[in-house]
Image: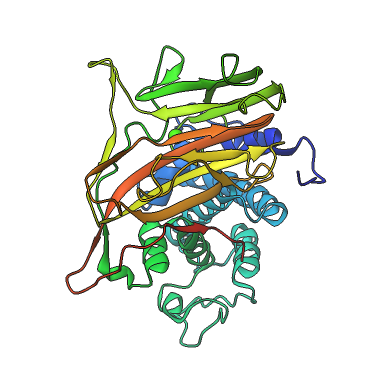
């Protein structure tokens, strides 16, 4: 586990993440006619703030400036945490839109100082802000050439850094060695992959897989449930906590987690069908805390010709949200089914969010031979 010098570590930051602004804006009371800070940030990121009154605009600018300050400081401490980068990019995008609404020049003003600093850190170069015209010269030489054609503002640099590590279409193209324009992703075949719907203590469409405390498994104390504080996507994530595990060699390893999928109406298990020879994407976000390397796993199939067999171990994340992506084929000679099972084999905690399985469509003339499953993990810049 990585030790950070800030206390109270992630829970404290989780509080800031969840409440976003109130945690760092104690002196300024929030007017009752404002929407919650997090939803306001999202709405500002989506559209220009044309309908905000001047005094409201000023107040929100103050909130966003302070949020950018704290998210930038957090990102400096935990650059691999994708949730931190996501929130930082969102706040800086909202700040830039507010700045435009106020007639400020791009990337100027006290509020953008933190965003510029983060953009410089992400791009590995000094960020020269052009306030009058789009940059003619590359200002971020460490980024790929196509990136420089985009509107280059601190928020644009942060959004690009986030997309490089979260855009599944781009990542699939990278894994297959084809152009991103030649890749299309089908609908998500996983039900409730974001774990935002819960029924009687378990996520809808998922069943609790408890391979412990009965033969042939070791005894253990595991608990599963919802985390509504630090989800990567939506409002909730699924969590598995291991408290104690018996290590008797003549028994199978204790393990447990959530297994797609339980059909409530049919009272039967359903599977995700994979056609022969077509590539598929398996993708999710996860974070581990005090969990041994490789102890959190994903299982999809017994057959090594259907994506991959047995549990695929995930690297520990030191409390950060990481992204897992795999691209594989049904290389058997018949239609096959998978049932994603995400679980833990050890004491400590793991959370999962945004589980996806999608068919990958390739443009006509683009072919990739069915091969071993390819795995991708986000790396820091
Ligand atoms: Ca979620």
Q: From this viewpoint, which residue is outermost toward the left?
A: 364
Q: From this viewpoint, which residue is outermost toward the front?
A: 250
Residue found at x 58% / y 32%: 344
**In this picture, is 150 found above or below 63?**
below
Q: Quadrant of residue 147?
A: bottom left
Q: Nearer the viewer, residue 254 or 127?
A: 254
Q: Quadrant of residue 103?
A: bottom left
Task: Count all numbered tags in the image, as a single digit.
Answer: 0
Q: From this viewpoint, which residue is outermost toward the top?
A: 200
Q: Is residue 137 left or right of residue 282?
A: right
Q: Which percent across, then down, holds residue 158? A: 53, 62
Q: Nearer the viewer, residue 271 or 194?
A: 271
Asked if residue 28 shows in the view, the reply is no
Q: Which percent across, then down, holds residue 268? A: 28, 19
Quadrant of the image where one finds ligand 1: top left
Q: Is residue 149 left or right of residue 287?
A: left
Residue found at x 42% / y 72%: 151
Q: From this viewpoint, which residue is outermost toward the right?
A: 5
Q: Which percent across, then down, holds residue 289? A: 68, 37
**In this picture, is 114 found above or below 367?**
above
**In this picture, is 348 found above or below 65?**
above
How is the protein colored in the picture? Answer: rainbow
**Image quarter (top left, top right, bottom left or bottom right) of the C terminus:** bottom right
**In this picture, is 199 found above or below 255?**
above
Asked if residue 11 shows in the view, the reply is yes
**Image quarter (top left, top right, bottom left or bottom right) of the N terminus:** top right
Q: Which percent across, then down, holds residue 346? A: 66, 31
Q: Quadrant of residue 76?
A: bottom right
Q: Nearer the viewer, residue 170 or 30?
A: 170
Residue found at x 38% / y 50%: 307
Residue found at x 41% / y 60%: 372
């Amino acid at each position: 586990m990585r030790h950070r010098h800030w206390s109270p570590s992630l829970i404290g930051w989780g509080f800031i993440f969840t409440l976003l602004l109130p945690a760092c804006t104690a002196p300024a009371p929030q007017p009752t006619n404002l929407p919650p800070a997090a939803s306001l940030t999202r709405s500002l990121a989506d559209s220009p703030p044309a309908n905000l009154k001047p005094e409201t605009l000023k107040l929100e600018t103050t909130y966003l400036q302070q949020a950018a300050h704290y998210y930038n400081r957090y990102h400096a401490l935990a650059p691999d945490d994708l949730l931190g980068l996501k929130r930082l990019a969102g706040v800086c995008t909202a700040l830039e839109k507010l700045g435009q609404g106020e007639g400020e020049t791009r990337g100027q003003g006290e509020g953008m100082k933190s965003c510029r600093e983060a953009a410089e850190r992400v791009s590995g170069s000094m960020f020269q802000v052009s306030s009058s015209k789009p940059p003619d010269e590359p200002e971020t030489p460490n980024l790929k050439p196509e990136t420089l054609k985009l509107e280059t503002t601190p928020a644009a640099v942060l959004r690009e850094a986030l997309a490089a590590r979260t855009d599944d279409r781009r990542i699939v193209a990278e894994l297959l060695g084809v152009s991103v324009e030649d890749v299309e992703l089908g609908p998500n075949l996983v039900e409730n992959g974001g774990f935002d719907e819960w029924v009687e203590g378990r996520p809808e469409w998922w069943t609790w897989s408890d391979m412990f405390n009965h033969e042939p498994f070791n005894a253990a104390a595991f608990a599963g449930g919802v985390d509504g504080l630090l989800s990567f996507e939506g409002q909730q994530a699924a969590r598995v906590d291991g408290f104690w595990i018996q290590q008797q060699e003549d028994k199978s390893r204790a393990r447990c987690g959530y297994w797609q999928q339980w059909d409530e109406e049919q009272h039967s298990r359903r599977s995700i069908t994979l056609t022969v020879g077509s590539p598929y994407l398996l993708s999710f976000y996860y974070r581990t805390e005090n969990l041994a390397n490789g102890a959190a796993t994903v299982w999809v199939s017994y057959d090594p010709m259907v994506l991959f067999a047995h549990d695929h171990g995930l690297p520990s994340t030191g409390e950060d949200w990481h992204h897992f992506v795999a691209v594989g084929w049904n290389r058997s000679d018949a239609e096959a089914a998978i049932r994603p099972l995400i679980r833990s084999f050890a004491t400590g905690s793991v959370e999962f969010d945004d589980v996806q399985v999608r068919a990958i469509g390739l443009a006509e003339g683009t072919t990739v031979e069915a091969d071993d499953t390819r795995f991708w993990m986000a790396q820091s810049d």
